[in-house]
Image (spheres, rainbow, N blue to C red):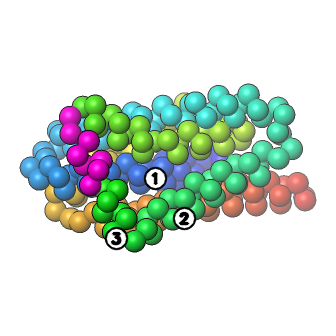
Amino acid sequence: MTGIFTLGVLGLSLSVDAFAAAVGKGASVKHARWNDALRIGAVFGFFEAITPVVGWVLGLALSTWIAAVDHWIAFALLCGIGGNMIRLAMKDASEEAAEVEQPKAVSRGVLGLVGTALATSIDATAVGVSLGVMQVNILSACLVIGAVTTVMATAGVMLGRHASVWIGRYAEICGGIALILIGCSILYTHLTSAAG
């Protein structure tokens, strides 16, 4: 689980919420420049990087009690988050339009941006629990997750200037699938090493 490739895929999976929100932000700010996009991306990346620490501390605290089933917990959390991302992305257009319009009204200014960044990083807290029970190096994980989210959100703002928000929906589906695959990989690795 500690491999840089796996952490990169995890970072990509967690960053799709921020990417989708940034696409919406870019669509509403038609003349966003690279420095604006980078500033927005950095805010998303910062919150996405620090929220897993909360879950990681909780996961470490529980890891001695749940060592026998930690792989099942990691599997369930990652599959649950991934499944929820897919479910939300597949909502019908009328529900999605109602949900997107409200944050756009609130997301003006620094407080709105911080609120949106916090909202999109909540799933990273639950993933942090998985990182804690799997005893992953949290500093490496946070750096990779934060860097990937910064790049994805920055790209999302710039892309949002020219594209539709449907791109964010497909990115969320791909991110959800990736989280489920990581959860399955953790479970498979543990079960096969226990059998051997």
Q: Are marks 1 and 2 in contact (CB under 8 Å)?
A: no
Per the rendering, the mark at residue 83 is none
72 relative position to 165: left or right: right
Q: Which residue is mark 3?
A: 93
Residue 95, by quadrant, is: bottom left
CB of mark 1 within 8 Å of CB of mark 3?
Answer: no
Asked whether residue 106 is drawn in magenta, I would say yes
What percent of the width, then of the height, locates residue 50? 48, 31
Q: Residue at x 70, y 54 (%)?
A: 75
Q: Give SS at disc 1.
A: helix
Answer whether residue 183 is magenta in the image: no
User: Residue 177, relative to residue 29: is it above or below?
Assistant: below
The mark lying in front, picked from 1 and 3, is 3
Per the rendering, the mark at residue 12 is 1
Residue type at numbered disc 3: Ala
Q: Nearer the viewer, residue 123 or 150?
A: 123
Name the residue tied to disc 2.
177
**Which one is nearer the viewer's eye here, 138 or 95?**
95
| Residue at 52% from the left image edge and 45% from the top image edge | 123
What amino acid is labelled 1 in the image?
Answer: Leu
